[in-house]
Image (tube, helix red, strand yellow):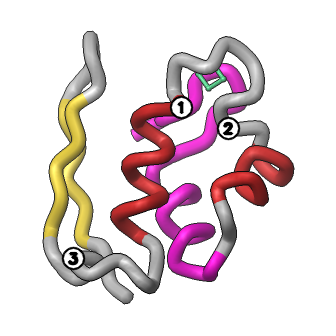
Amino acid sequence: MIVCVCHRVSDHTIAHAARSGAEFDDIQLELGVATQCGKCEDCARALWSECRPSHKLAHLSQTLQMPGSQSVTWMATA
Ligand code: FES
């Protein structure tokens, strides 16, 4: 699922970056997430936070619901 429409960044790309240890600022700089209209920021931050290696629940399946779109479920692994 595309999380950032402005820059066509998917949930998979954000999750992969988060699992690789990227800070949210790094994701913004490298991918442009939440740097244009900003509507994706809450969703992108939630996804990044859930997929960070240090997140206590990173091994659990998560479901994310964006207003006006389909929900997405992903398996975050640390
Ligand atoms: S949807 Fe991400 S900056 Fe607009």
**What label sits on residue 33 in the rendered view?**
2
Label located before the other in sequence (2 or 3): 2
* Residue found farthest to the bottom: 78
Label located before the other in sequence (2 or 1): 2
In which quadrant will I find the N terminus?
top left
User: Label 3: few (<14), some or many (≥20) within 10 Å?
Assistant: some
Please name the amino acid that badge 3 sits on.
Leu
Q: Position of residue 18 (x, y in %)?
A: 55, 69
In which quadrant will I find the C terminus?
bottom left
The residue drawn where x is 65% and y is 55% is 24
Q: Is mark 1 within 8 Å of ligand 1?
A: yes
Closer to the camera: disc 2 or disc 1?
A: 1
How far apart are labels 2 and 3 at the CA level? 23 Å
Residue labelled with disc 3: 57
Please state if 63 lies on the left or on the right of 48 as rendered: left
Q: Position of residue 46 (x, y in %)?
A: 38, 48
- The kind of secondary structure element at disc 3 is loop
Label located before the other in sequence (1 or 3): 1
Please state if 26 lies on the left or on the right of 15 as rendered: right
Please name the amino acid that badge 1 sits on.
Glu
How far apart are labels 2 and 1 at the CA level? 7 Å
